[in-house]
Amino acid sequence: MNHRFRFLSSAAAVCAAGAALFTSGCSSVELNPEGSMVAVYRFGEFRMLLNTTAPVASQAAQRALAQFDLYQTGATTNTYDAKIVARTRSDQQVVIEINEINSRQCMLRIRWGAGGDVVRSRRLYEAIEAGIPSA
């Protein structure tokens, strides 16, 4: 009987892990009606390129936090990367990571909450992009 219980609990764990992998994954998020700008939403993380440097993107991200009623709990900005951590009123963690790819572009990654929220992440991305000064 004890072996049967172990087998059933192991089978349930394998099924739960398989379901988690099957339901989460990678998807594309169209950012304009023509479909020429597409972001990636992968495993709860929103990813998109910004045409600026990491310090400029970091400043725009910090300004965008106020628009979403987010409380900044930490920030680290270096020459080529930045990480901003904030909290929502419902105590969800929002993490924004910025990494320069070259002198004119950086990768922006947003995770809203533990499992991610594609709608809120996209809106935050749009607010950050709107806050970047044009050259």
Image (cartoon, rainbow, N blue to C red):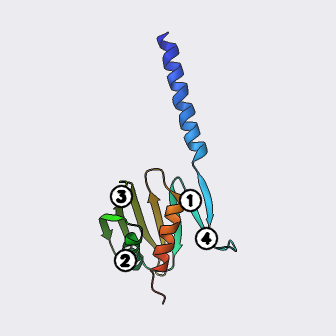
x and y percentages locating residue 109 in the rendered image: 47, 64
**Between 85 and 53, the one nearer to me in the picture:** 85
Q: Nearer the viewer, mark 4 or mark 1?
A: 4
Q: Earlier in the sequence, mark 3 or mark 4?
A: 4
Q: Residue at x 61, y 70 (%)?
A: 31
Q: Earlier in the sequence, mark 3 or mark 2?
A: 2
Q: Secondary structure at mark 3?
A: loop
Vertical order, 67 against 113 (above or below): below
Q: Residue at x 62, y 57 (%)?
A: 27
* Marks 1/2: CA–CA distance: 23 Å
**Between 32 and 102, the one nearer to me in the picture:** 32
Three-letter amino acid code at the position of disc 4: Leu
Q: Earlier in the sequence, mark 1 or mark 3?
A: 1
**Disc marking residue 41:** 1
Q: Nearer the viewer, mark 3 or mark 4?
A: 3
Q: Residue at x 50, y 56 (%)?
A: 117
Vertical order, 15 against 123 (above or below): above
x and y percentages locating residue 86 in the rendered image: 35, 62
Q: Which residue is mark 3?
A: 89
Three-letter amino acid code at the position of disc 2: Gln
Q: Are marks 1 and 2 in contact (CB under 8 Å)?
A: no
Q: Secondary structure at mark 1?
A: strand
Q: Which residue is mark 4?
A: 31
* Marks 4/1: CA–CA distance: 12 Å
Q: Which residue is mark 2?
A: 59
**Between 65 and 37, the one nearer to me in the picture:** 65
Q: Nearer the viewer, mark 1 or mark 3?
A: 3
Q: Earlier in the sequence, mark 4 or mark 1?
A: 4
Vertical order, 110 against 92 (above or below): below
* Marks 3/4: CA–CA distance: 27 Å
Three-letter amino acid code at the position of disc 1: Tyr
Mark 3, other Cα within 10 Å: few <14 / some 14–19 / many ≥20? few
